[in-house]
Amino acid sequence: MRYGPGHDGLREGDADCCCPPHATAPLRHSSDTTCQQRTASPCCGAAPQPAATQPVGCCRCCCCSSSAPRKACHMQDICYHVRPSRRHSWCSSSKADVACLDQEQADKGFHEISDRSSPALRQCGDPHSSLRRQQQPKTSLPLSLLLLLLAAYTDPRVATAAGAGAEAVDSSAGGGGGGGGNADVGCEPPRPLPEGVMVRWSCQNYSMMCIDQQQFISYDPAYNPRLSRKKLPAFSVKDVVYNWPNPWGNGDKFERGRDLHVAPVVLRVNTSEEASPDLRQPAFSRCTSPVVLWQRWMFNVGEVFETSYVRMWEEFHAGQVDPALSLVLATPHGLRLPKFARLFFEALYDKEVTSLAEFSARRHDMRQRSNATAEGWHVRCFERVTLCRLRNRKEDTLCAAGAHLLRHYGPRLPPVSDLFHPELDRETLKVVFAGRPNATGRALLNEGELLAACNALQPEELMREGGELGEELGGGRKRYRRVKCVSHVFGGNLLYDLALAASIDVLVATHGAAGYHSFYMSRGSSLIEILPYKFSHQWVNLYYAKMLQFEKKVFYWSIWIQDPLNSRPSAFEDADVFREAYAGRERHVSLPWPALRRHLANVLQVGGNALSYKSAYLSGRHSISDGLQPVENRLDLGKEGWEGYKGDKEETTD
C-alpha cells in the first residue's frame, strides 16, 4: 500500500502497511506505537471497527493501491485514539506543513485535509491545492500560532512551508494566510546561482515565494508580521529604463519616448485574503527555480544581445549557471516578450523563456501546460526565487557568443540559396545591404543605384587598382572571382537572418541594430558602417568599432557622411515631438558610389587576413568620408586593440 499525505507526495513503504510517518497507533485500540498490521492497512485496507472512545483527531489523506494506477487513488479518513508525542505528526511527514488537531477539534468531528499539488495526489480531488475541509472550525489565532511554533521547533521546514500565516492550512481561518507544502516528486532541484554570478548580475534570492500578476508574495515566516519585525528586503529597478516601442523605429528619438522607467517591483508578505486557491494553499516547487531578469532597453535587439545574452553566455560557458533554471524576463508593464529574446536565451536554458506577466498570470485552468516549469504545468509558488537586473553592455566576446547561437540552432537554420548558391557562389564576394524600406530615418536612399554598381564590380580590376596597397597588404589573402550584392531586410525571420549573416563576406549598413548581425559573420569578413551627417564620433565609437576590435574576427570599416548634399532629413526632424539631439543619427543618406567602391576594394585587397587589416587600420584606411578623405577614428584599446595585435594569438572563434 501507499500513503500519501506527506510533504513529498505519495510514499511507498517497504511493507504492506499504510501508517503515516511518526503516527502512533493508527485507528486501533492498542497503545502500540509502531505500525505492525501487514494485511489490512489502517488507511487503505478494510474499514476499521468503530472505536470505543472518541478519537482525539482525524486527518483526511490520499491512499492508492500499489498495484493499481494512480487514478485508483481515493480519499480516506485516518483517526487517532492515542495522542502523538509530536503534535505535528498527525497528517504528514517530518517535512509537512499541516498543523495538528487538538481534542476539542476532534470532538467537533473536524477533519483536517492534507492539501497537496503533486501529480499523484491530484487524483484524490481538486488538482489545484484546494482539497476543501469538510467542516471548517473557527480556530483561535493563539492556538494556531502555537502549533506553528511547535512544528518549527521539531522541524524548521514546517515553519518555512507553513509560510507567514497563523493558520498553516488555510488562509481563510484568518491571521495571515496559508502556508504550503512541497509538491515535487523525485526531482533534481536546479543549482542556485553562485555568489559571484549573484554579484555580477545584481541578484537577490527570496525563499518561499509566490508570483501573482507580476507581484512577489513572500510566505517566509522570517518576514511575517505576526512572527517577526524584519522587513521584507526590497529590490530596486529604478535605474532600469526602456524606449517606447512603436512602428517608427527607436522610441528615443521622441521627447517622451526615451528612458521610460519600468514599474517598481512589488514585494509583500502573504495575507488571509489571497484571491487565488494556489496562493491560499501554496505548494512550493523545488524543481522549478525562476530567475526573474530586468534588462535595460528591453526592446532593442542589440542592447539585449550585448547586455544580457552575452553576459549569460559567458557564465554558462564557464559552467557557472545551471541550464535547468527557469529564466523569466520582466518586460515593462507586462508587454509581450520580443521574439529575439527567446532566440537568445533559449539557446542557454533548457526551459522555455517567458515574460513575467505570462509566468505569473492567474489561470482558470491551473493544469494548463507550461514549458517554462519543470512540472510541465502552470506553477506560481517556489522554494527559491531569484531577482536580477542587468543594465550595462558587454563589449567583448560578442562574436563568440554569436557563434554559440549558430551552433545551437545549426540544424534548424534554413538555406539561403535564394540569395547565394552554396556551390556557384563559392568564389564570390557576397555583399548584403541592410535594407530599410519605408524607414522614417537612416535609410540608404540610393540603394538601387549602389546595388547595380556593386554587382558590376570586377575583383581583378580592383586588385590591380590597389597598387602599393595591394602589395602592402598581400599575403595569406582569400581570392574572389566575382562580386554579388543583394539587399535584405533583417528582423523578419530570425533564423534566416542568422544563416545569412554567417554565409556572407560583407555587411553594408547605416548605424543601427542591423549591424549587430556582424557578430554572426565568419572570420575575416567585414562590416561597412555608414554614419549619417553630423553623427557624433564619440557615440559611434562605443558600438561596433570598439566591440569588433576586441575579438578581431570581423573587420570594421566606416564611411562618414560629411557633405550635407548627401543627407536628407528624417520623417520627424521638423516635428516638435522630435529630440533635436538625435537629428544627426536619424538622417537619411545618399551614399556616393566611389566611397563604397573604395572600401569594397580594401576588403578584396585585405582578403580576410587579420595582419593585412591591421596594416590598413594603422594607416587610417579603414575610416573615410563620403569625399574619400581619411577620418581619424582609431580607438586606444592598448594591447587589446589592433596596435597590440601580433598575429600569434590563437584564433578559435568561428
Image: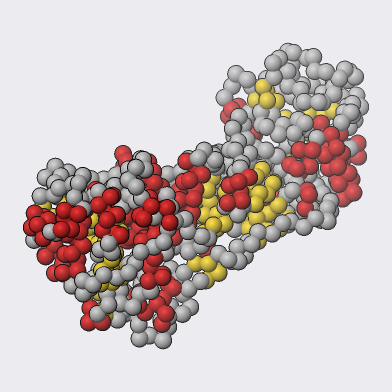
Residue 221 place in picture, x, y as percent? 78, 48
Q: Residue at x 83, y 18 (%)?
A: 34
On the rendered structure, is 84 left or right of 3? Answer: right
Toward which corner of the image does residue 574 lie, by quadrant?
bottom left
Residue 94 place in picture, x, y as percent? 77, 31
Quadrant (top left/top right/bottom left/bottom right) for the C terminus? top left
Of residues 199 and 64, the one drawn nearer to the viewer in this rendering: 199
Of residues 134 and 97, the one drawn nearer to the viewer in this rendering: 97
Count the numbered circles shown. Answer: 0
Q: Residue at x 63, y 28 (%)?
A: 73
Residue 296 place in picture, x, y as percent? 51, 62
Of residues 461 and 25, the one drawn nearer to the viewer in this rendering: 461
Display colour scheme: secondary structure
Q: Residue at x 42, y 53 (%)?
A: 639
In the image, residue 74 above or below residue 261: above
In the image, residue 322 above or below residue 4: below
In the image, residue 44 above or below residue 5: above
Residue 277 visible to the viewer: no
Toward which corner of the image does residue 635 lie, by quadrant?
bottom left
On the rendered structure, is 102 left or right of 478? Answer: right
Residue 103 visible to the viewer: yes
Residue 646 place in picture, x, y as percent? 34, 47
On the rendered structure, is 303 left or right of 419? Answer: right
Quadrant (top left/top right/bottom left/bottom right) for the N terminus? top right
Q: Residue at x 40, y 77 (%)?
A: 582
